Image: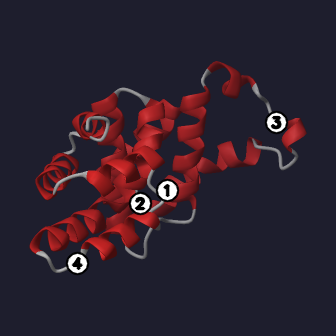
């Protein structure tokens, strides 16, 4: 099973063509072929397409047990991951953005509350410290003005993940 195969399954799941159990069942051949002893693992995929392989396994991990308590949340996440990969055309960047993608609704809520003064700067920084976002994204979020934070949330909401990634790279 390749990353393209997993993404196609995510697309079908996100569209409602298959259920979570069917999505998870599609991972079974991949999981069954993966030996528990790392020394017995085939390192070929890691040598030839490390970023694709890393994203593939991260997706399998996310959806193997179900991401949330509601299947609809899992479907939304699946659609976002597919959209991100199509937006960025980059498995490494998509993998890097996964923490933002999985947390984008909560982040947007916190950003909007922070912009309105409901959440203090200290509270906002505390949330970022515990977020699991990549270090450079945390740094950008810590120093961004409220308008930039709101713009980032709008890009995430619109599914323009390439522009969102570029935004957190700029001062």
**Chain-order first, disc 4 or disc 3:** 3
**Chain-order first, disc 1 or disc 4:** 1
State which quarter of the image contains the C terminus. top left
Label 3 sits on residue = 41
Label 1 sits on residue = 22
Q: Which mark is residue 119?
A: 4
Bin the neighbour count of mark 3 within 10 Å (Cα to Cα): few under 14, some 14-19, many 20 and up: few
Residue at x-position 23% and y-position 52%: 144
Task: Describe the element under mark 3 as helix, strand or loop.
Answer: loop
Label 2 sits on residue = 19
CA gap, disc 4 and disc 3: 47 Å
Mark nearest the camera among 1 and 3 is: 3
Residue 1 visible to an observer of this rendering: no
Task: Describe the element under mark 4 as helix, strand or loop.
Answer: loop
CA gap, disc 2 and disc 3: 30 Å
Residue 9 image-quadrant placement? top left
Q: Are marks 4 and 2 in contact (CB under 8 Å)?
A: no
Bin the neighbour count of mark 4 within 10 Å (Cα to Cα): few under 14, some 14-19, many 20 and up: some
Which residue, as the protein is rendered here, is positioned at the far top? Answer: 48
């Amino acid at each position: 099973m390749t990353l393209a195969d997993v993404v196609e399954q995510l697309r079908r799941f996100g569209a409602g063509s298959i259920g979570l159990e069917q999505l998870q069942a599609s991972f079974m051949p991949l999981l069954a072929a993966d030996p528990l002893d790392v020394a017995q693992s085939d390192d070929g995929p890691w040598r030839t397409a490390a970023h694709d392989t890393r994203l593939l396994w991260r997706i399998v991990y996310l959806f193997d047990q179900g991401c949330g308590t509601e299947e609809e949340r899992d479907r939304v996440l699946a659609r976002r991951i597919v959209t991100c990969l199509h937006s960025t055309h980059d498995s490494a960047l998509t993998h890097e953005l996964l923490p933002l993608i999985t947390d984008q609704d909560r982040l947007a809520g916190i950003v909007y509350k922070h912009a309105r003064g409901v959440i203090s700067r200290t509270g906002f920084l505390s949330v970022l410290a515990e977020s699991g976002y990549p270090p450079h994204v945390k740094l950008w979020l810590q120093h961004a003005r409220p308008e930039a934070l709101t713009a980032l949330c709008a890009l995430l909401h619109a599914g323009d993940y390439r522009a969102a990634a570029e935004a957190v790279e700029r001062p």
